[in-house]
Structures are given as structure tokens and as C-alpha cells.
Amino acid sequence: MTHAIRVHRYGGPEVLQSEEVEVGDPGPGQVRIRQTAVGLNYIDIYVRTGLYPQPSLPFVPGQEGAGVVTAVGDGVRDLKVGKRVAYAGPIGAYAEERLIAADRVVKLPNGIEDRVAACIMLKGMTAQYLLRRTYKVGPGTTLLFHAAAGGLGLIACQWAASLGATVIGTVGSAGKALIARAHGCAHVINYREEDFVTMVKALTDGKGVDVVYDSIGKDTFPGSLDCLKPLGLWVSFGQASGPVPDFKINLLSQKGSLFATRPSLGNYTATRKDLVETANDLFDVVGSGKVKVAVNQTYPLADAAKAHQDLEARHTTGSTLLLP
């Protein structure tokens, strides 16, 4: 038996219940992991509330973690007991031990600690595809990144700056502005005190930015579109403030023949090859020191409800870990 957090009904943080569960032996193609750290992400809230419904109840939430392989199932060739691994994607992370498909985990290099790995797999691989594939960021790119002081924002803004981009970030407080500025943002807009569309236009001499990365949703629409130069790209990859309202596609034409996409990590890492390449690119940039990871909050796994409360209240900065 092992301890895990389970959800028996959708709802607020109070539905996160600490319970004993049976893990069992790995089946064919699976490994069992003793987890040393679990990442907290905003998508966990979407899952907990039922915005992203699960196939059945109860379930163990969480999509990111790191630990040590304790058993391997039939057919697993490239992972052995004792190997340090990490993953992002398959739900079930809020547990001391778990089973997972072996082709969804990656080996950790010596230079990446478990706690760092547990908070960069989902956020860091998301940053990788956003900056390297969804839009190829490089010298000359000017971009707007909403929630720049969040866990993903701090990784992505540092990474974008290291690629030569000019990064404009939005944040919700003066304290978060200081953090964002220290992590790659050339310009920071406090959206509680300034209109971000007006500020972006001023910072770009009226031209707008090449790409907007928007995980906020309702509150930043259609303002994000108004920040783009003609033919610019709006990347909507989250909805922390609620879903983007329905809109007529002609709006993209009216605002400058804009492009729009709604990407997901699952699609960008669907094949084993893409998963490994994405993770290795992330490990390289973190290992080189170009991207520094800030684990600013840790909670015991049993206090997952409190961690969710703080995340929803926007009381957190950087990355947050749950420790089994």
C-alpha cells in the first residue's frame, strides 16, 4: 500500500483526499516508480474541477513527477531498477508510488536533480515546444508572455531571452514584476495598474509583437490579438481566468490576418522520438545554466489541497512541488 491523493467527485480543493491505495506490479510495458517529487500545475485544477473530465472516478490527479524505478514489466528493455526518471503527461502523479507506461518516462541526466526535474517536465517541455516549434523564436523576435512570473513563465522567458528575443511579460504585482525582470523579461507590465495593450503598443512603437503566448484566456481576450502585428501568431494554451469566449473567425482578418493556435504538450510529444528530443533539449538548456529553475514553494503531498488554494489565489511564484 502507498499514500496517494484521490478525487471522488469534482469540485474545490477540499475534494483532494489523502488515502491509502494499492499500486501493484507493473504490467507489460510499464514501470513502477517511487516518486521523490511531484510537480504542481494549473492543469491539475482543470482536472480537479472537471473542466478536463477523467474517464472514471475516483482518480489520482497530477501529471508531472520524478523518482526512481522500483520494478519493470515484461518488454521493458531500456529502463532498469534504480534508474532515475521523470515524466509529464500521464495522470496519477499525486502518489508516493505509481505505475506508468515506460515509453512515457525519460532518463534523468546526472546534472538534473529530482526536484528540478519534477517541476520542469510539464512546464519546461511546454516552453520548449512553444518557443522552438509552435513559433520559432530567435534574434529579432519580439514576444508577449502572459503570467511571466509563473512557473512556466519564468522558464519560457529566460529561454526566449537566451535565444535572442525581446521579451515583454505581464504580471499581477510589483513583486512579481521584479521576479519576471530578473528572469529574461526586457519589459514587464503590471496588468492591475496598466493596460497591457496600450503598453505593448508603446513598447513596440505601435508595431505590435510577433507572437503572444496566452495561458490566461478570458481576461486577456481579445486584448492579446490587439498586441499582435499583422500576420502575428496568437498562441492560446491555457485558460486560468476562464475559457476564451466564442468568436467569429473573421475577427482574425479584421485585426491583421492573424494566425491562432491552441497547442498541447500531448500532441507535441505524442511519439517517443518527440518526447525524448523535447526533454533532452530542455535538460540541455537547464544544465547549461541558461534557464535557472526556481522552486519557490514546497508542500507535503498530504497538503495538496492547500497547494491548490494558493495556486488558484495566485499566491505562488515560480514552481511548486508536492513532496511524498
Image (cartoon, rainbow, N blue to C red):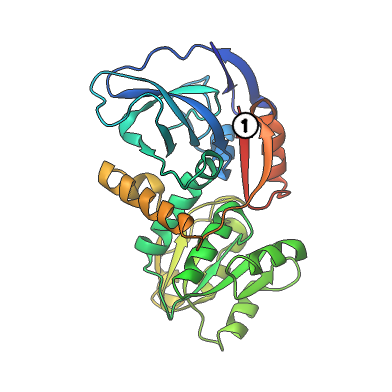
Q: Nearer the viewer, residue 7 or 226?
A: 7
Residue 248 placement: quadrant: bottom left
Q: Determine the residue positioned at 42% across, 12% down.
A: 24
Location of residue 171 in the rendering, given as x and y in whole percent from the top left corner: 67, 63
In this rendering, position of residue 93 left or right of residue 133: right
Q: Nearer the viewer, residue 243 or 83?
A: 83
**Which residue does the numbered mark 1 point to in the structure image?**
323
Location of residue 119 in the rendering, given as x and y in whole percent from the top left corner: 54, 44
Label 1, secondary structure: give it.
Answer: strand
In this rendering, position of residue 102 left or right of residue 23: left
How many dots with numbers? Answer: 1
In this rendering, position of residue 291 left or right of residue 29: right
Q: Determine the residue positioned at 34% across, 50% down.
A: 268
Location of residue 175 in the rendering, given as x and y in whole percent from the top left corner: 76, 62
Amino acid type, mark 1: Leu
Q: Determine the residue positioned at 33% across, 26% down.
A: 80
